[in-house]
């Protein structure tokens, strides 16, 4: 057998300069976490839809009451 040293090369899989990404803890501390924003938008949307539905239902009931009152006269 040949007693020569093996010449191996290593390749770098991770780039030496990674892009700057803020840590999630900074998002939570500063209040602009993407998850936090999505959750807040979902909550606000559901409240808005609920409020709109309440106004529509109240308007429908008011109209029904007014129509019944007119029919009685």
Image (cartoon, rainbow, N blue to C red):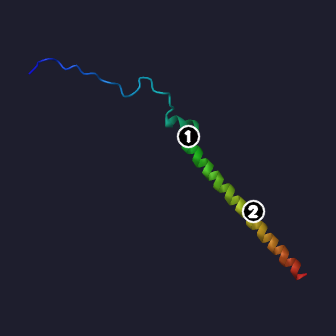
Residue 58 position (above or below residue 47): below
- Horizontal side of 61 relative to 11 (left or right) equals right
Q: Quadrant of the N terminus?
A: top left
**At numbered mark 1, what does the secondary structure look like: helix, strand or loop?**
loop
Residue 33: which disc? 1
Q: Residue furthest left?
A: 1
Percent position (x, y) of residue 43?
62, 52
* Spatial separation of the CA atoms under disc 1 and disc 2: 33 Å
Residue in the picture at 48% in, 27% down: 19
Instruction: Return the residue nearer the eye: 29 or 52.
Output: 52
Percent position (x, y) of residue 64?
80, 74
- Horizontal side of 15 relative to 39 (left or right) equals left
Q: Quadrant of the C terminus?
A: bottom right
Earlier in the chain: of badge 1 and badge 2, it is: 1
Residue in the picture at 85% in, 73% down: 66
Q: Residue furthest right?
A: 73
Q: How many residues crowd mark 2 within 10 Å: few (<14), some (14–19), many (20+)?
A: few
Please give the residue where the numbered disc 2 appears in the rendered image.
55
Which quadrant of the figure has residue 15?
top left
Q: How many residues crowd mark 1 within 10 Å: few (<14), some (14–19), many (20+)?
A: some
Residue in the picture at 72% in, 63% down: 54
Residue 73 position (above or below residue 14): below
Residue 22 position (above or below residue 3): below
**At numbered mark 2, what does the secondary structure look like: helix, strand or loop?**
helix
């Amino acid at each position: 057998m040949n007693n020569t040293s093996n010449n191996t090369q290593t390749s770098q899989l991770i780039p030496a300069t990674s892009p700057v990404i803020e840590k999630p803890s900074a998002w939570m501390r500063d209040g602009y976490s993407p998850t936090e924003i999505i959750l807040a938008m979902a909550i606000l949307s559901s409240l808005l839809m609920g409020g709109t539905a309440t106004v529509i239902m109240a308007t429908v009931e008011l109209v029904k009451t007014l129509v019944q009152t007119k029919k009685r006269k």
